[in-house]
Every structure is written in C-alpha cells, then in structure tokens.
C-alpha cells in the first residue's frame, strides 16, 4: 500500500518551480533585451546584430529557436528513458539528483561569455542555450511526470498544481526584480554588464539549492508503484496522440503558450520603449501583476474545483488576448500618466496570469489520469514529453520570429523599432484567440467523470 502524499511533501516537491521561475524569467524576459540591447541600457554589443540568415533571422532568434526545437525533440526521448527506468530509487528522482546542478549552471553561463568577440560569443551562446534546454529536460520531464503519479486525488492534484504555480510565480517575481537589483549594483560603480551577471549568479545559487532539496528529501517509491510501459517510444507517442482529448488540450496549450511567449520576450521593450518607463522602475509594473495574480490564486483554485478547468482557461485566454491588443495603444496616453497606465495594465493581466499559471498543468493531469484509467499503464513521462514537444515547437517558432519583428522600423544604429513592437503584440494576441477556439472542442465532462469514477473504485 502506497503512502498518501501529505501537504508538506507536495510543498517540498514543488520547490524546484521557484528555480524554474527564476531561470525562465532570465531567458524569456531578459535574454533578447541583454543580447539585443537598446542604447539606454548601457549594455555592450556582444553578439552579431541584425538579420544574418536569409535576410529575416537574427543570431539570437536562430539560436534560441534551434534550442527550443532540440529541447522539443529530446523531451520524448528522455521521457521514454524515464518511464522505463529501473533504478532502485525510482523512475524520476535519480534524474533530478543527477542533473540539478548542470541545469542551474548552464542557465548562468548563457549570460557569462568571457570574450568580446561577437563570433566567439555567438558560439558560446548557442552551446549554453542548447545545454540549458537539455538539462532542463533531463530534470523537469521526470519531475513533471512524478507529480500526477504521486497525487492521485483530483482535488488534491489541483492544490498541488496551485502550489507548483505559486512557487513558479514567486520565483518569477524575484526574477522580475532583476532591473532593481542591477540598478543597486550599478550604484556601487559596477559596469551594467557586471551588474546583470552578478544578479543572475545570485539567482543561480538560490535555484540550484531548491532543485536539489526534493531530489534528496523525497523517497519516490514510498508514494508510487508504477506499471512500466513495455512498448517502444514510437508506440508510446502514437498512443498519446491517439487520445483525442490529449490532442485538443495540447493544441490549445500550443497556441496559448506561443501567445505568452511573445508577451514575455517583449515585456521589457513594452515597458521601456512603448510606455516610456525607465528600466529600473519596471519592477513596479511586473511586481504589481504578480501580486495581483497571487491574490487571485485562492479564487482560481476554488473556481477550478467547482467548475472544472475549461471555462477558466477560455476566460484567461480571452482576457490575455485583449491585454496584448491593448499594448498597441498604450503610447497614445500622455507621458505623465505612463506609470498609472502601466500599473492598471499590470492589474488587468493579473487574472490571465493566475489562470494560465495554475490551470494548464492540472488540465493536462486530468487527461493523463483519464488515459491511465483507460489503459492501465502509467505513461506520464511520455504524455508530458509529447505535450512539451508540441508546445516547444510552437514556442521555438515564436522565439525565431520575435527578434526579426522587433527590428522592423528601427532607427539607424538601433535594434528595436516601434512598428515591430506593435506587431509582436498583435501576433501574440492572435495566437491566444486561436487557443480559445481549440478549447471549445474539449469535452471535459467525459474526462472528469471517468477520473472520478475511478477514484471512487480506488483505482
């Protein structure tokens, strides 16, 4: 008989999401800003600028897009290995022990090239972005697969994903404090690039510790007795995509995640270039949205338990799409009201931030549990990887496009154009609207009825 997972164990298990929030903010919110800097940032030009491939792609756009594709392709491979792992400590925890440190260190080294030579830096950036995605996969695919295996009760699973999201958001909040920390370090006389790098060094140390804690504190085999798949990886993936609910939810999350990628990659530009707010004050805007979303967490948790996940997802995507389109008009307000407008905007996006941080994981967990009930086999790793494969392909396309769009309309000597920023908001909003259409086809009642009936029977 397996042990029931306690609230304390769930909280402990979710700690790595704080680290993921930090690292994701470093890459999604500041990578392009760091390597495609504005003159006001004071950052040096480290890599080759402008279009370098077919007249439409930038170096950073190409490198990050290839990284996402590599990441997406490696996901199902790692998942298949994890699903069939026969280590004495379980199928998931050993991966978390082995790859926590490489995961954290590779995130830091992305920003720490020792050279001023653009060609060398191009190579350095490629090597460590791709390394980061590999180690992310080796740690997070097993971690994500273990949660629905450990927590079998639907209501408690919603709570688990709420904690998961809470740590991610709080980690992101610390990440959003980057510009404030950078400003403090610069006041000591440090160069801007040194201030940025030492800020990220502090994040890496915190992240590494949090990645290691559950890997050594949780005994997987006390909570999980898994039936390992015996079929090949190809057949496992075919099985995952044969599930119509999995296809629908994955497609919806593909478009929603892609829309979010446009917003995250450009948020610093929206604040500094379109709203005209100084870099060091961006923390006020970002912190407001995060605090606003955290206040809404209990409401979203209760709403999801009472009404399911489909309606909250549709509402969250709808509000987020409106927010992205609003970005196109923020610069029409008088500059003396820029901060007030920005704060109101950040409060507006608090709802979709709360929804889109909590609900997608628990919605996918419902589908995975539904399949386990139907098939009798635990293939959480393969399902998580197959979903990740699709969404990361979409994200890679977004990251490939964004730097090229941002350049449109840029003045001579600059890497960012007003017209390009408006285009990123329009394209991001459109992707999010498409997600709504996809979610309308999801029959959540059938999924939840099947899962709940299995819970009653003790399956």
Image: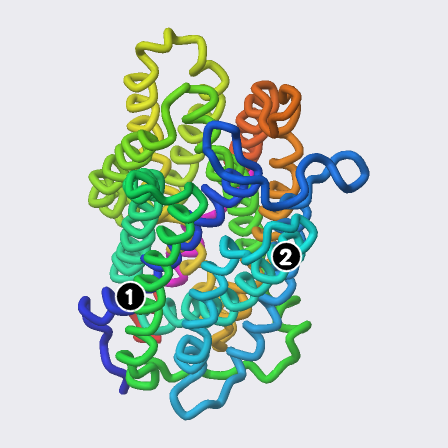
Q: Is 145 situated above or below 354?
A: below
Q: Where is residue 88 drawn, in percent x and y? A: 41, 92
The quarter of the rendered structure image containing the N terminus is bottom left
State the extent of the magenta-drawn residues as a range: 438-451
Give the residue number, with chain letter if any, for mark 2. Answer: 126
Circle number at residue 130? none
| Left or right of residue 260: residue 63 | right
Residue located 36% across and 44% down the image? 190
Give the residue number, with chain letter if any, for mark 1. Answer: 153
Q: Where is residue 2 drawn, in percent x and y? A: 28, 83
Name the one closer to the observer, 351 or 313.
351
Residue located 34% across and 85% down the image? 221
Snapshot quadrant of residue 129: bottom right
Q: Where is residue 204 drawn, in percent x and y? A: 37, 61
Q: CA distance from mark 1 to mark 2?
A: 42 Å
Name the one closer to the observer, 431 or 225.
431
Q: Is residue 170 visible?
A: yes
Number of marks in picture: 2
């Amino acid at each position: 008989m397996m042990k029931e997972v306690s609230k304390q164990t769930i909280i402990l298990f979710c700690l790595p999401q704080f680290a993921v929030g930090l690292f994701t903010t470093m890459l999604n919110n500041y990578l392009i800003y760091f390597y495609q800097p504005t003159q006001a940032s004071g950052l040096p030009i480290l890599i080759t600028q402008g279009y370098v491939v077919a007249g439409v792609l930038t170096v950073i756009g190409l490198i990050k897009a290839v990284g996402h594709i590599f990441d997406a392709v490696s996901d199902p491979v790692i998942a298949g290995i994890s699903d069939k792992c026969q280590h004495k400590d379980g199928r998931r925890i050993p991966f978390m022990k082995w790859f926590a440190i490489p995961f954290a260190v590779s995130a830091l080294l992305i920003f720490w090239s020792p050279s001023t030579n653009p060609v060398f830096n191009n190579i350095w950036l490629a090597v460590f972005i791709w390394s980061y995605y590999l180690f992310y996969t080796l740690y997070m695919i097993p971690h994500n697969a273990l949660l629905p295996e450990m927590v079998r009760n639907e209501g408690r699973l919603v709570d688990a994903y709420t904690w998961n999201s809470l740590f991610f958001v709080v980690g992101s909040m610390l990440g959003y404090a980057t510009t404030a920390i950078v400003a403090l370090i610069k006041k000591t006389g440090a160069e801007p690039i040194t201030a940025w790098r030492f800020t990220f060094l502090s994040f890496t140390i915190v992240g590494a510790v949090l990645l290691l804690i559950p890997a050594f504190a949780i005994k997987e085999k006390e909570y999980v007795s898994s039936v390992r798949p015996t079929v090949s990886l190809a057949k496992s993936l075919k099985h995952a995509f044969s599930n119509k609910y999995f296809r629908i939810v994955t497609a919806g999350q593909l478009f929603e995640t892609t829309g979010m990628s446009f917003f995250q990659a450009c948020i610093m530009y929206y604040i500094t270039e379109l709203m005209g707010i100084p870099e060091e004050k961006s923390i006020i805007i970002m912190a407001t949205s995060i605090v606003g979303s955290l206040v809404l967490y209990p409401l979203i948790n209760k709403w999801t338990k009472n009404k399911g996940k489909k309606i909250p997802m549709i509402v969250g995507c709808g509000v987020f799409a409106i927010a992205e389109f609003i970005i196109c008009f923020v610069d029409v307000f008088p500059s003396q009201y820029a901060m007030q407008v920005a704060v109101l905007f950040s409060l507006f996006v608090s709802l979709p931030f709360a929804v889109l941080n909590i609900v997608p994981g628990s919605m996918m967990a419902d589908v995975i549990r539904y399949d386990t009930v139907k098939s009798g086999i635990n293939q959480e790793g393969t399902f998580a990887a197959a979903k990740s494969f699709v969404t990361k392909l979409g994200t890679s396309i977004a990251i490939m496009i964004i730097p090229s769009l941002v350049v449109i309309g840029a003045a001579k000597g600059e890497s960012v154009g007003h017209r390009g920023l408006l285009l990123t908001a329009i394209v991001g909003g459109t992707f999010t609207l498409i997600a709504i259409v996809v979610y309308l086809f999801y029959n959540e009642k059938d999924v939840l009825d099947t899962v709940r009936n299995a819970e009653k029977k003790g399956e």
